[in-house]
Structure formats: C-alpha cells, structure tokens
Image (spheres, grey):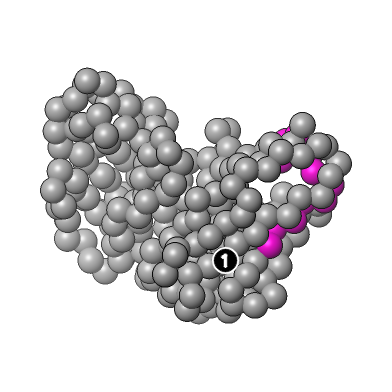
Amino acid sequence: AQKVTQAQTEISVVEKEDVTLDCVYETRDTTYYLFWYKQPPSGELVFLIRRNSFDEQNEISGRYSWNFQKSTSSFNFTITASQVVDSAVYFCALSEVTGANSKLTFGKGITLSVRP
Amino acid sequence: DAGVIQSPRHEVTEMGQEVTLRCKPISGHDYLFWYRQTMMRGLELLIYFNNNVPIDDSGMPEDRFSAKMPNASFSTLKIQPSEPRDSAVYFCASRSQDYTEAFFGQGTRLTVV
C-alpha cells in the first residue's frame, strides 16, 4: 500500500529564512510519481511540481527547489529566502502506476507560517 | 477550459438530511477523485473513477456515503443521512493520465448542524 508521511505539522520562520519541508513515501511499485501542492489561505490546491521515479535530478524553480532521493524514499521541498506569501499548507503526494489503478495519495500537509 | 467545477461552494444542512455534492471534471480527463479535508485527518481520498468506473472506494467512510459518475462530465457524492462529523471541505479533482498532476476544484464546504 502506498503511503506519504509529512512528519512536520507546523513550521514557523521569519521572512528571508530558508525552510525545508520533508516528505517520505512508501510504495512497492518501481514506477511512481511524486507531487507537491500548495494550499494558500484562500483554500484552493495549487500544483507545484511532479517528479517520476526514474528521474532523480534535483529541480530548481526560482526560490523553490526539490530534492528527490530514492535511497531514502524522500522528496523534500526547500523554499529559499521565504516570503510572507509563502504562508500556506504544503502537501506531498504519491501516485503509483499500475494499469488502470492510479490512486493519488496525499500526506497530511505541513502548515508553513512566514512572519514578517 | 474552466477547470474543475464543484457545486455548491457552501452547504449548511441539518443532521439527518441528504446532501449531494456535484463535480464537473475537466473535459478529456479520464480520472476523477473525491477527497475530504479536515483538520484532524488532512486530505483523505474517498473514491476515484477511471473512465467513469469506480476503481477504489476503500476510503468511503461508511454506507451513508455513495458516489456516482454517470458520464464523463459529471459526478456526484451523496451523504444520506448526514451527520455533524461529516462537516468538512470536499474536493473533487481530475487528471488526464495516471502520471499527470491532478487539478482540483474550489471545494465544497459542508457544515452539518
């Protein structure tokens, strides 16, 4: 069974600090996809990134970067020089690929508060 | 495309009443998911469909919950009878393939009093 663990529940930082959000996953499949979503206070869920299990290259997009390590089953998300607008709940998600079965499972989310 | 459309956005109902939540997925998407979000349990997957067929409903909490997808452009989640513990935000999401991201609707905030 697939599972996503986000052990951190709440993180509070001061603006301009760097912050890393942890995500650990469990799956028996060799082919799978990992995702990060952001849920700002307005409540919508916004897709941030997708990574497949065969691509372990780290990715950087502006102040955001993602570190995928299969050896530790982790897909961590770092925000550099955080800003107040980064305050949100961040979800990590896992999708196995098994024929027609493609469950998309989310972790419990990490509430990030960035103080001015 | 207008994205995933859910209705209503807010629903307040009395305990024991039937509640029906509606979702219109993005056109051409093969997968549709229903999630429930609460503070305690986070985002729980209730059920998902592939090409209108329910694939996994193991997350449906009990028989009071049912979901249907009569065609590719419409799905419903019904709670009958509703209970106060069903109060939550219910999200619908769709995706085109098993490896793509899911797009979420705005959610329905359900309050059962």
Do we see residue B20 in this rendering?
yes
Q: Magenta segment range? A: B76-86
Element at label 1: strand
Q: In this view, does A54 lie above or below B17?
A: below
Q: Residue at x 36, y 36 (%)?
A: A88
- Any part of residue B56 in sight: no
Please name the residue shown 82% across and 49% down the image.
B18
Left or right of residue B10, residue B113 in this image? right
Q: Where is residue B66 in the image (x, y as percent from the top left)?
A: 75, 59
Quadrant of the frame with the N terminus of chain B: bottom left
Badge 1: few (under 14), some or many (20 or more) residues near its Cα, within 10 Å?
Answer: many
Residue A55 percent location from the top left of the image: 23, 66
> What amino acid does circle 1 point to?
Lys
Q: Which residue is drawn at 69% across and 75% down?
A: B70
Q: Nearer the viewer, residue A51 or A45?
A: A45
- Tell me if residue B82 is in the magenta stretch: yes
| Residue A60 versus residue A100 in the image, above or below | above
Q: Residue at x 41, y 35 (%)?
A: A41
| Parent chain of label 1 | B
Q: In this view, does A29 lie to the left or right of A78?
A: right
Q: Quadrant of residue A86?
A: top left
Look at the image and tell me in which quarter the C terminus of chain B lies: top right
| Residue corresponding to mark 1 | B24
- Tell me if residue A113 is in the magenta stretch: no
Please state the horizontal and vertical placement of residue B44, each as a whole percent of the image.
57, 48
